[in-house]
Image (cartoon, rainbow, N blue to C red):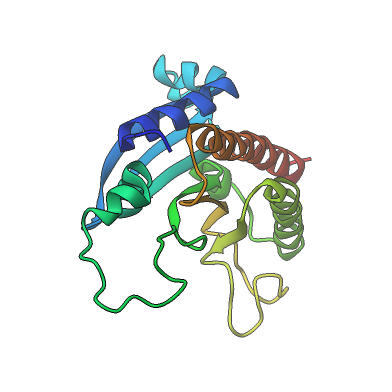
Amino acid sequence: MAEITRHQLSALLLSALRERGLGARDLFEGRQEPLSWFFRVVAYDQSELDILESGALDTLHAPSAMVELVVDEMALGLANIGTEGLGTYLAPQEDPIPGRDGLELGPEVMLGYVHIDVAPPALWLDERESNPTRNDALASRLSKVAQEVGAVSDTVEVHIEGALDPEGGWTDPKENVRPAGVAVHFTFDIPLAGTGKRELAAVFARAADGARDAVEGMRSVFRGDHE
């Protein structure tokens, strides 16, 4: 990997989102632990973001994608200096193991991850009636979107918060339950070994494609829910 900084990583991710018609707002970065840096952004369809930023909030309720890039800064440093650079930090072994003299980056080590949570606006959930049939249909359509969009990701999950009841479940006719929160979650792995700018751009392109398609899928789910 040519030397790259965490801010170049975030710039590559934003560029991938823009190329797919997604606008970004509420950029934020920070640390989760001593060696873990994260960058978060909320992405909207650019045309809808233009309306949001014009101040016409009352006329628009659009699904959004929370995109989070998490980077292992030790892995990033190792990627930049390579095994030869790493060797300058190590003392030679007094009794090296035969066949184990060289160094290589473990294939299971991750440089980082891109996490994406796509959710509908709160109003869409607030307007829903507590209807077991509609709840079941919503879960089915969300699962279908997750499966279709998730084909480009490494992990995919559907979250319906506050909806499950241990006794009857949220589709039980006797229960008066509606989803309190809905999201479709995707994760894209960024391996340390063999990752350069071209590979990073490819991962971010897949993530941006997933965010765009999931936003449209979320919109279609709730549009169908009102038909």
Given residues 48 and 178, the one toward you in this image is 48
User: Residue 21 appears in which quarter of the rendering?
Assistant: top right
Given residues 57 and 100, the one toward you in this image is 100
Which residue is painted at 74% across and 63% down in the image? Answer: 136
Say left or right for 41 vs 51.
Answer: left
Q: Can residue 60 be seen from the camera position used here?
A: no
Q: Can residue 227 be seen from the camera position used here?
A: yes
Q: Position of residue 23 (x, y in %)?
A: 48, 24
Screen quadrant of the N terminus: top left
Above/below status of 216 relative to 69: above
Above/below status of 91 relative to 205: below
Above/below status of 145 relative to 176: above
Say left or right for 80 vs 46.
Answer: left
The mark total stands at 0
Q: Position of residue 125 (x, y in %)?
A: 56, 49
User: Residue 211 appears in which quarter of the rendering?
Assistant: top right
Q: Position of residue 84 (x, y in %)?
A: 33, 49
Q: Position of residue 210 (x, y in %)?
A: 63, 40
